[in-house]
């Protein structure tokens, strides 16, 4: 399903704990078609603090059929964009581009799925958990944060999971430490067959490392800085390790993939997490393997100012 540019309407805005805000947005074209792991690029209509839309994972979807289907995003305040979003009111309009990105791949056969989330980064895992449950898969969860206040919806995680492990760095809830401290034993105890993860970069790298050692497939949802969100500005590329095609020479190379179109979900074993890439094997295969830039999403309702997409990040 291709992305749309639509005018959404805020149905509700909630403060969740001390730090998080959630917005439920009426946008049927997006809510009916979005898949777990995909994201939306949003901007309040008629405000001036930022020109670029800001990307957010879809946290939950409520399909009502027809005009009323909604999606929900959840976020913390980082800067002007999130500050404006947190100040929105019921009935305020939101310029929404989406669904964007590739989303998580769901297992084809019945599987034991382990979802590993850190802080606000765990947002897309709740939508994923709902879809995995609908499809009859077993779900286990490891949820971590610096403190108990920063745990994202631990109550829902416990409800959705067969086994739920909580970690906090200050020990205010669950085990003291980080998610990777309990990951190995949890994989073993749950007999996990696939791992899905989203959170801070360092956590994703560590989770991918544990899964690599356990020879488990791991899908990671990255949150790179983005500008356009639909494949034209190249501000969101991340390096992936690729194997040479059969019959090709050399041992492989590096593909620079756009996390807004080829991602944000990647095979964790392919991501080159460290900034340092060994020179001799580094081949830019982007022109060979990256498809041409995606067409800009088709506009259903084009809001005022929608043309200002090419300003530098941070605007
Ligand atoms: C695919 C994707 C999904 C996302 N999902 C969520 C989500 O569900 N909930 C949520 O709270 N946030 C999410 N983010 C991050 C969110 O987009 C940023 O927090 C937001 O754009 C910040 O906008 P701002 O104007 O408030 O802050 P800015 O002024 O733009 O930035 C403030 C600070 O936050 C940093 N920052 C901005 N974007 C990111 C980012 N992507 N990753 C790390 N640091 C960043 C900046 O470097 C700067 O230091 C997601 C990002 C991506 C790419
Ligand atoms: S954000 Fe522009 S190419 Fe990805």
Image (tube, rainbow, N blue to C red):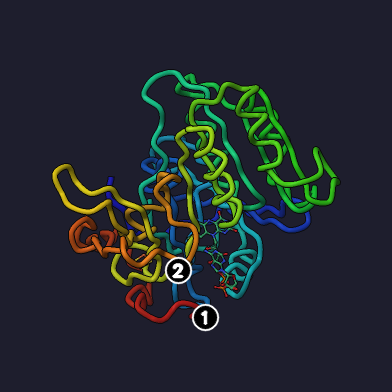
Residue drawn at (32%, 53%) of the image: 262
Decide if residue 6 is in sight here: no
Residue nearest the viewer, comparing 102 with 50: 102
What x and y, as percent, mark residue 291?
Answer: 21, 57
Q: Residues within 10 Å of mark 1 (few under 14, many from 20)?
A: few
Is 81 drawn above or below residue 205 in the view shown? below
Q: CA distance from mark 1 to mark 2?
A: 12 Å
The quadrant in which residue 227 appears is: bottom left
Disc number for residue 112? none
Mark 1 vs mark 2, foreground winner is 2
Q: Which residue is mark 2?
A: 53
Is 61 drawn above or below residue 112 in the view shown? below
Secondary structure category for the residue under label 2 = loop
Residue drawn at (37%, 64%) of the image: 237
Relative placement, left or right, of 292 versus 264 is left
From the image, which quarter does the N terminus lie in? top left
Disc number for residue 48? 1
Relative placement, left or right, of 266 versus 61 is left
What x and y, as percent, mark residue 36?
Answer: 45, 41
Q: Quadrant of ligand 2?
A: bottom left
Residue drawn at (48%, 66%) of the image: 275
Is 238 drawn above or below residue 134 in the view shown? below
Residue nearest the viewer, comparing 107 with 201: 201
Residue drawn at (66%, 42%) of the image: 180
């Amino acid at each position: 399903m291709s992305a749309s540019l639509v005018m959404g309407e805020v149905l509700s805005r909630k403060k969740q704990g001390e730090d998080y805000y959630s917005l439920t947005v009426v946008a049927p074209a997006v809510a009916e078609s979005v898949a777990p792991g995909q994201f939306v690029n949003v901007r309040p209509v008629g405000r001036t603090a930022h020109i670029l839309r800001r990307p957010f994972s879809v946290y939950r979807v409520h399909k009502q059929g027809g005009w009323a289907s909604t999606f929900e995003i959840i976020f913390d305040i980082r800067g002007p964009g999130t500050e404006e979003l947190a100040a929105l009111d019921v009935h305020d309009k939101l310029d929404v581009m989406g669904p964007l990105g590739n989303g998580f791949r769901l297992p084809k056969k019945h599987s034991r799925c382990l979802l590993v989330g850190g802080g606000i980064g765990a947002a897309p895992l709740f939508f994923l958990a709902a879809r995995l449950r609908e499809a009859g898969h077993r779900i286990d969860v490891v949820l971590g944060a610096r403190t108990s206040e920063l745990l994202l919806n631990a109550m829902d995680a416990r409800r959705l999971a067969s086994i739920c492990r909580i970690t906090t760095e200050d020990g205010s809830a669950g085990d003291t430490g980080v998610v990777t401290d309990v990951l190995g034993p949890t994989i073993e105890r749950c007999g996990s067959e696939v791992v899905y993860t989203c959170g801070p970069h360092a956590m994703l790298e560590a989770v991918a490392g544990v899964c690599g050692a356990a020879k488990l497939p791991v899908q990671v949802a990255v949150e790179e800085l983005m500008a356009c969100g639909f494949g034209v500005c190249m501000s969101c590329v991340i390096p992936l390790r690729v194997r040479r095609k059969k019959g090709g020479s050399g041992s492989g190379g590096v593909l620079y993939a756009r996390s807004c179109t080829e991602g944000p979900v990647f095979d964790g074993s392919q991501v080159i997490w460290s900034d340092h890439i060994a020179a001799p094997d580094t081949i830019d295969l982007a022109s060979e393997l990256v498809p041409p830039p995606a067409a800009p999403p088709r506009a259903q309702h084009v809001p005022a100012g929608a043309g200002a997409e090419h300003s530098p990040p941070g605007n």
